[in-house]
Amino acid sequence: MLNRLRSAVERAYLRHLRRRVETVPTHVAVIQDGNRRYARERGDDAPDGHRAGADTTERVLDWCADLGVSELTLYAFSTENFERPDEELEPLFDLLEAKLLEFADADRVHDQGVQVRAIGDVDRLPLRVREAVDYAEERTADNDRFTLNVALAYGGRTELLDAARGVAREVAEGGLDPADVDVETVERRLYDRPIRDVDLIVRTGGDERTSNFLPWHANGNEAAVYFCTPYWPEFSEVDFMRAIRTYQAREESWQRARAERAAALVRAVAEVELTEARRVAGRLRGRLPRSEHDVVTEELPDGEAVREADAESEPAG
């Protein structure tokens, strides 16, 4: 009975969150943290946690499709993950291979128009994983309604370093003028995988850091960030909607700030121009008979106030 009541309350709250969503991020990036801790707390091995996390990943794809998110990037395997013991890495590589192959052939993936792309130093991965990546990319290459970036052997600093080296190499070879280096020049060298700027980063598992994830596309775009405590296998649709609301609140705050800055600029310009206009009008009135002062005063935006001030300054007769 208590579980049914809790489920009913959660469904009602989820409907409430959905109704309040007005602005949807175009690109969401997720740091899927907590798989191993989730397994450990249940007395399971790390691979069990990764498998449970893979199920969450599939649900998140559906939630993104329902909301109209256009691009999702998952931090599936970082360069630091290579330091884990072999007894953990091998099952993880098996899972990556199996899920990529399964995903590439899933009907709902093609029904939703999902295109799979890998970003990162994929050549460092085992052959079987690289072949699964190639298969998934080829099978979904013609899909164009939703982009799923899977970050594999990925490190943000390495990504930027490789791009910088590519630019330096081309400059040294004479194929690029340093003066022509711009944002697009760098972006073309980020793993040859152009992606949209990140609007929202979500991290599960309780840690409040972005862990070297998409620094160019997220930090450069001042992406909203949502940290939450559930481990990735426990991440729910309510958690996801809260993340969306965090993005929306950030956008609303930015819009208010932009409007306030624009209004302040207009006021500043108007005050400068009005001050100058008053100064010029004062000089002109000094050259005219008092009976003609109103002709000049009426041309000022606050002419009535100026007339009242002049009247108060006149000596009593």
Image (cartoon, rainbow, N blue to C red):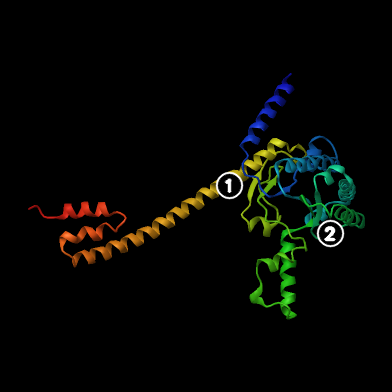
Picture residue at 47% right of the left edge, 51% below the top: 260
Q: Position of residue 89 (x, y in %)?
A: 87, 50
Helix, strand or loop for disc 2: helix
Picture residue at 30% right of the left edge, 62% below the top: 277
Instruction: Give the residue furthest to the top.
Output: 1
Q: Which residue is mark 2?
A: 122
Q: Is disc 1 surrounded by few (<14), some (14 to 19) or many (20+) residues within 10 Å?
A: some
Amino acid at pointer 1: Arg
Q: Is residue 178 left or right of residue 279?
A: right
Q: Which residue is mark 1?
A: 250
Amino acid at pointer 2: Val
Picture residue at 71% right of the left edge, 38% below the top: 230
Q: Position of residue 174 (x, y in %)?
A: 73, 81
Question: Disc 2 and disc 1: Cα gap in Å?
Answer: 34 Å
Q: Position of residue 256 (x, y in %)?
A: 51, 48
- The one nearer the camera, 127 or 88, is 127
Q: Is residue 156 left or right of residue 291?
A: right
- The one nearer the camera, 48 or 191, is 191
Q: Is disc 2 surrounded by few (<14), some (14 to 19) or many (20+) residues within 10 Å?
A: some
